[in-house]
Structure formats: structure tokens, C-alpha cells
Amino acid sequence: MTLDQLFGLAGRTALVTGATRGIGEAMAQSLDAAGARVILAGRDRQRLDQVASALEHDPVVLTADLQDPDGPTSLAREARASAGAIDILINNAGGSWNQALSDVDDESWDRTLRTNLTAAFALTRELAPTMAERGWGRVVNVASVMGLVGDTHSSAYAASKGGMIAMTRSLAAELGRDGVTVNTLCPGWVETDLVSDLHSDDRFQQRVVRRTPVRRWGVPADMAAAAVFLSGPGSAFMTGQTLVVDGGLSATW
Ligand SMILES: NC(=O)c1ccc[n+]([C@@H]2O[C@H](COP(=O)([O-])OP(=O)(O)OC[C@H]3O[C@@H](n4cnc5c(N)ncnc54)[C@H](O)[C@@H]3O)[C@@H](O)[C@H]2O)c1
């Protein structure tokens, strides 16, 4: 098999949420490099335009706030209207609201679940039927190691990411017969704006390095490589799975 037959995405259209920066930006760049036309979705139009300017395959930029109840549905409709059928959905947008149990009020719980889990479900519900009709599709849900193990001040975030892992398995069961795979990618600690306060705290930063077998933090490109695999032809026999990319952190103690 050629590398193209395993990883090539020419002729495919991919929607990446949270593409303004960090992991989503890196995934958009790598999918474009593999040949896909990428639809970049996010809240900051200027930033999306900057990311798009570095892409080769006629990218599309769409703004959407996935916390809005109509956000995911309108995004899916606009994506189809601007680029036609979507072959690959990367549910990457997400946020972490690091809060102690007593500080997680109903609004904060809802916001976390809406952005990290409900939006991914709603986008999949909108876009997967066309993938199934066409007999080919990829859904990649970006969860977190925190969906597999617990930590302090993480109850809502961990619930949203654990929910994503469980949702992935059931959607895989439902969509597999139509050529649509659904997998979860679980990053460990990755240097992005999301965790910049923790990364700039020397003690915490070193603690992560000491506990991680490969002795470093992840970088967005580590996640992008996995996303290209999960989006491509070479992962056709893999569905409902959780691919953990964390430098070995969760495999050891
Ligand atoms: N960085 C890490 O250490 C780490 C670890 C595990 C999982 N993750 C997950 O990876 C994904 C990407 O995170 P990142 O580290 O690149 O963070 P980031 O904060 O740099 O990027 C997150 C992206 O999601 C977008 N987003 C957030 N809320 C949104 C909303 N309501 N509507 C639309 N877009 C919204 C942001 O604008 C941004 O583009 C997230 O789902 C995060 O939970 C990150």
C-alpha cells in the first residue's frame, strides 16, 4: 500500500471545530497537508482567517458559538451550504472550567456539558446521516485523559469527556455498517492556551514531565498526527475506540 492509500485525504472535506488555535489549528493544518479541504469553525473570525491563510486546499471559514443551543445545527447547515457533503468531522472545540465541587453551579455545569459534549453530539446527528448515505465517513471526538481518570476540580469537565467516550462507542455501533467510523482521541497534557497557567507554573510543569514516560509535555502536532490517522483510509477497521496520546502518562503510576 502507498502512504496515500493509508493516510491520503485528497477529495475529502473535513469540518474542524475549535480551529482558531492549539490542537484544532494543528489538526486543520495536518488534514490540509494530507489533501483535505478543511472547514475551520470557531468564534474568532480574524483568527480563523489567519489560520486559513496558511492552508492550501481552498479552506472555508465559519464562525459559531457552540454554547448556543442553535450553534451546532446552524454550523452544520452553513458547512454543507458552503462546501457540500462533509466526510470528516473533528469535534475538537472544548473548554475546561477548573472548579471545586462547591463552585460548580448549574450554569457552569451546563456550559461545560453543552460545549464539550452536547455540541459534538448535535454536530454528529446533523452530519453523520449524509456520511452514511455516501458510505464513508469519519468522526473524531477529542476528549481527554480526564475522561478516563479522575482529578480534583474536574468533575464537570471529566463528566463531559467521559460522556464523549461512551457516546463514541454507541455511535460506532450504530454507524459502522454504513462505512462511518467514530473514535475518541484522548490527549494528555498538551502545551496550549487552555492550560497555559499550569504550563507556566514551574512546579506543575516539572511534575508532569517527571510523571510522563516520554519526559515532556505534548505539543499540538502530536494530536494532529493521530487525527490524520483516525480521519484517513488506513483506520477503516478501527471504530468505537479510545486512542490515548499522552506520552504514557495514564499507562503508568
Ligand atoms: N491542552 C490540553 O492539555 C488538553 C488535554 C486534554 C484534552 N484537551 C482537549 O483538546 C481540545 C482542544 O483544546 P486546546 O488545548 O487546543 O485548547 P484551546 O483553548 O487552545 O482551544 C480550544 C478551542 O475550542 C474553542 N471553543 C471553546 N469553546 C467554544 C465554544 N463555545 N464555541 C466554539 N468554539 C469554542 C476555542 O475558541 C478554541 O478554538 C479541547 O476539547 C480540550 O478539552 C486539551
Image: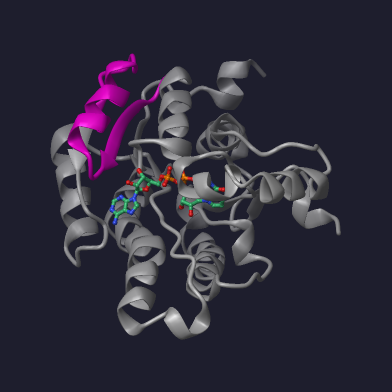
Q: Position of residue 88 (x, y in %)?
A: 40, 40
Picture residue at 76% right of the left edge, 43% below the top = 209
Q: Is residue 12 above or below residue 66?
A: above
- Based on the picture, tell me whether residue 43 belongs to the magenta stretch: yes
Q: How is the image coloured?
A: one colour
Q: Which range is magenta? A: 35-60
Q: Position of residue 214 (x, y in %)?
A: 80, 37
Q: How many marks?
A: 0
Residue 19 in view: yes
On-image quarter of the N terminus: top right
For this view, does 89 lie left or right of residue 58? right
Front residue (pair 141, 149): 149
Residue 2, compared with residue 182, is above or below; it is above
- The answer to whether residue 213 is above or below residue 54 is below
The vertical placement of 171 against 128, above or below, is: below
Q: Do we see residue 139 in this rendering? A: no
Quadrant holding the C terminus = bottom right
Residue 41 drawn at (x, y percent):
27, 41
Asked whether residue 140 is drawn in magenta, I would say no
Q: Locate residue 70: give its quadrant.
A: bottom left
Q: Residue 54 versus residue 75: which sits nearer the camera?
A: 54
Residue 226: x and y in percent read 60, 37
Residue at 57 percent of width and 50 percent of height: 198
